[in-house]
Amino acid sequence: MSRRLNGKESQLISGRLIIYSYGYMGFTEAWGAFFAYYTVVYDFGFRAIDLNGKASIYVVPHAPMNSYNPSSPYFGNTNL
């Protein structure tokens, strides 16, 4: 406790710290997360090119009384 306290005008977070944390470290962590995700997905047999556009596919939920019927044109889904 021999060190004096900082003055009221001192800042804990500077602009340089924000640029470093969000600009440099944020980009690096995001790139690492995407790399880890695609590495695990590839390990399960999916290539990265196979995943493009899959989030925009609309899936129609089945009604509770439906059962799978491979000979039906809609495979037993009455909601179509």
Image (spheres, rainbow, N blue to C red):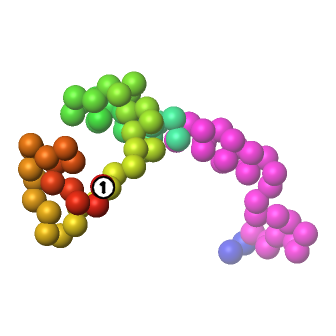
Quarter assignment of residue 41:
top left
Q: Which residues are magenta?
A: 3-29
- Please report the residue visible at 43 percent of the width from the left and 32 percent of the height from the top: 52
- Please report the residue visible at 44 percent of the width from the left and 40 percent of the height from the top: 33
Location of the N terminus by quadrant is: bottom right
Image x and y of residue 47, in percent: 32, 25
Residue 24 in the figure: left or right of residue 69: right
Query: Relative to 66, does residue 1 appear above or below in the rendering?
Result: below
| Dot 1 amino acid type | Leu
The furthest residue to the right: 9
In magenta segment, residue 23: yes
Image x and y of residue 72, in percent: 13, 46
Figure disc tally = 1
- Please report the residue visible at 21 percent of the width from the left and 33 percent of the height from the top: 44
Question: Which of 51/28 is in front?
Answer: 51
Quarter assignment of residue 25:
top right
The residue pinned by badge 1 equals 80
Judge the density around disc 1: few (<14), some (14-19), many (≥20) Cα neighbours within 10 Å: few
Question: Which of 76/28 is in front?
Answer: 76
Residue 6 in the figure: left or right of residue 20: right
Image x and y of residue 10, in percent: 86, 66
Query: Relative to 3, does residue 37 appear above or below in the rendering?
Result: above
- Please report the residue visible at 45 percent of the width from the left and 44 percent of the height from the top: 56
Label 1 sits on a secondary structure element that is loop
Question: Which of 4/72 is in front?
Answer: 72
Image x and y of residue 75, in percent: 16, 48
Question: Which of 21/50 is in front?
Answer: 50
Residue 18 in the figure: left or right of residue 80: right
Residue 55 in the figure: left or right of residue 65: right
